Image (tube, rainbow, N blue to C red):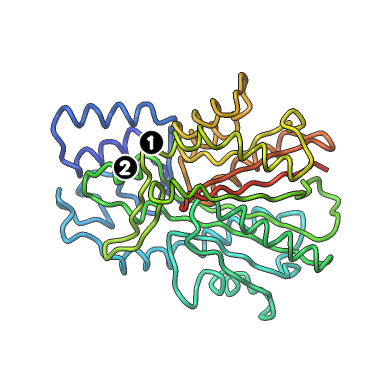
Amino acid sequence: MPAFKNRQDDILKFMQLVFAMGSIENRKLKYLYNHSGIDYRYSVIPDYSSEINDWKFYPQTENLEPFPSLEQRINLFNIHAAPLSVDAIRSCIHGIINSNEITHLVTVSCTGMSAPGLDLQVMDLMDLPKSTYRTSVNFMGCYAAIHALKMADAICSQEKTAKVMIVCTELCTLHFQKESTLDNITSSLLFGDGSAAVLVTGDLHPKKGIRLDHFYSEVITKGKKDMSWELSSSGFLMTLSGYVPELLEEDFSPLVTRALEKAGMRKNEISHWCIHPGGKRILDAIYRSLEFSNNDLGYSYETLKETGNISSATILFALKKIMHQDLETDHKIFGAAFGPGLTMETFVATSE
C-alpha cells in the first residue's frame, strides 16, 4: 500500500470542501460516506487527509485552480507505480522463488500508461533478465486481474517451467475530478490506491497454493454505458451509474450458473467466494442475487472496509485473505470481477 492511509471521514472533509455544496447536499454526502462500508483508503497523494495549507499536489485554493492536468497525474503515476509494484512483487515471492527465476512479467493498470512503461520500469528496478517475456494489460478496469490470470494460465499450460509474475498497480486517487457530478461523487467515495502481485507457475511447488481450473467471461451489453473509464485533459473519467447494482442483482446468478456448468460444477460445491468488492451496494446486490444467508462474501466486505476499491488489484487482496485461511485440500474457490463493458470475468480454483 502507498504511504498515505486516509480515514474515510477525513476524505469526506476534503470532498465537502472541494465540492462546495450546500448544507443539505453535504448531509447527503456524509450519509453516503458513513454507509460506504469503507473505513480506510490509501493514496500516493497526502492531500486527502491534510489541511489546505499542507496540500502538495492540488493548488492551495478552494476551487483547486489551476486544476492538475493529465500530464501531471501521469507524471506522478510514473514516479510511484513502479516502486509500489516492486514492493508487491517482493512481498509475493519472498521465501518462494528468487527474482531472477521470474520468466514472464505481466503488468496490469488502468490508471496510468506510457511507453516505455511500467513493465520496463519494474524490470530495471528488479534487475530482471533482459530476456524476460513481458506484456501489459491496460485500461480493462476492475476485471483485469482475472484476464491476466487467464493469460498466465495459458502461458503455463505451454511452458511447464514458466514462473509468471502478475502485478496489478492502480493509483485511482490521481484522477479525482472536482465537479460534483454523481459519477465524480461515486468515484471519490469508493476508489483508492494500491498494488497486488500474484505468482503463477507451470509446475507444482512445495508451498501451498491454489490451482486455476476454469475461466468464463460474459459481456452484459445493456450495461455498456453504465460502467466506463475514459481519458480527458484533466485525468481519467469514471462512469459508474446507480443502475450497475441492479444489473448485477439481475444477471449475476445466471452468470454464475453458466460459469459453473462450463466447469461441470454446482453452486453447493463452492466453499469460498472471491468477489470483487466494487462497492457496498454492488456486494449487497450480489449477495441477494446468489441468495446467500451467511458470511459467504465476508472476505470481499473486509477488503472493501480496509482499502476501498483499488480497481484491478482489489480481487487479489480478497483472494489473499482466502488463501491465508489454512484451506483444506480440494476446497473450491469461485472468483468474479466486473468492469467496463459491462464485462464480467470469472474463475474457479482448487486449493492444494
Residue at the spot of label 2? 49
**Residue type indicated by callout 1:** Arg
Furthest residue in direction bottom, as rendered: 130
Residue drawn at 55 percent across, 29 percent down: 289
Quarter occupied by the C terminus: top right
Instruction: Work out whether 99 lies above or below 296.
Output: below
Query: Where in the figure is residue 79, as x and y percent of width and height?
Result: 43, 66
> Which numbered disc covers residue 349?
none
Residue at the spot of label 1? 7
Q: Which secondary structure, mark 2? A: helix
Query: Where in the figure is residue 264, as x and y percent of width and height?
Result: 79, 41
Residue drawn at 28 percent across, 56 percent down: 56
**Residue type indicated by callout 2:** Ser
Within 10 angstroms of label 1, few (less than 14), some, or many (20 or more) residues?
A: some
Instruction: Work out whether 191 lies above or below 165.
Output: above
Residue drawn at 60 percent across, 23 percent down: 291
Within 10 angstroms of label 2, few (less than 14), some, or many (20 or more) residues?
A: many
In-front residue for pair 65/250:
250
Query: Where in the figure is residue 175, as x and y percent of width and height?
Result: 34, 55
Q: Which secondary structure, mark 1? A: strand
